[in-house]
Amino acid sequence: MGFFDFLSGGIVEAVGKVADDLITSDEERAEKENEKLKANLAYKAQMRESDIKETEIYLEDKQSAREMNSNLVASKDWLVRNTGSLLAWFIVIGTVALDYMIAFDNLKDAVADKEVLMFILGSMNTYTAGVISFYFGSSKTEADSKRTIH
């Protein structure tokens, strides 16, 4: 008898719970839908807040870079003021010279390992792209346009 009492009581309760979970009234469905909408709105608000914090951090970083550049420009030492520009010129001129030598086969015969030469060329071209984007462009606008597309 104890086995049948357990079986009948346990099964009835389990089936009742499943039925309660599956069969809901219109009011319960509307309440659950309302909870989902509230959670979605809370998520969107949190994402907006995160975007605002990200923009604030970006602007603070930009401001500190401007302050550093202002300090360098205000320096009385010629070398301190012009180190960045001289380095940029060296990178660009070196890359153009290396590209020219490779294009006209002036350097291929002198270097035994052409893979190393191509690696150096790729690195120099990357540095040159960084210099050009520093002086003439910004990756922030590209990031904003990618975010708008998505």
Image (cartoon, rainbow, N blue to C red):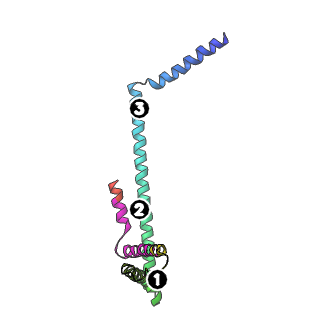
Q: State the CA–CA distance, disc 1 to disc 3.
A: 78 Å
Q: Earlier in the sequence, mark 1 or mark 3?
A: 3
Return the disc, 2 or 1, that comes first in the chain's sequence: 2
Determine the secondary structure under disc 2. helix
In this rendering, the answer to whether 142 lies above or below 136 is above
Quarter of the rendering occupied by the N terminus: top right
Q: Which residue is mark 3?
A: 31
The residue under label 2 is which amino acid type? Thr
Going by the picture, which residue comes out furthest to the right? Answer: 2
Question: Is residue 18 rendered magenta in the image?
Answer: no
Q: Tell me the CA gap for discs 2 and 1.
A: 50 Å
Camera sees residue 9: yes
Magenta span: predominant SS is: helix
Q: Nearer the viewer, mark 2 or mark 3?
A: 2
Magenta span covers which residues? 120-145
The percent coordinates of residue 131 (x first, y second) are: 40, 76
Indicate left or right for 60 with 1 as reference.
left
Residue at mark 1: 110
SS for dot 3? helix
Residue ID for mark 2: 55
Where disc 1 sits, the SS reads: loop
Q: Nearer the viewer, residue 88 or 126?
A: 126
Packing grade of label 2 (10 A; few <14, some 14-19, many >=20) is few
Q: In this rendering, does residue 76 appear at all?
A: no
- 1 to the left or right of 147: right
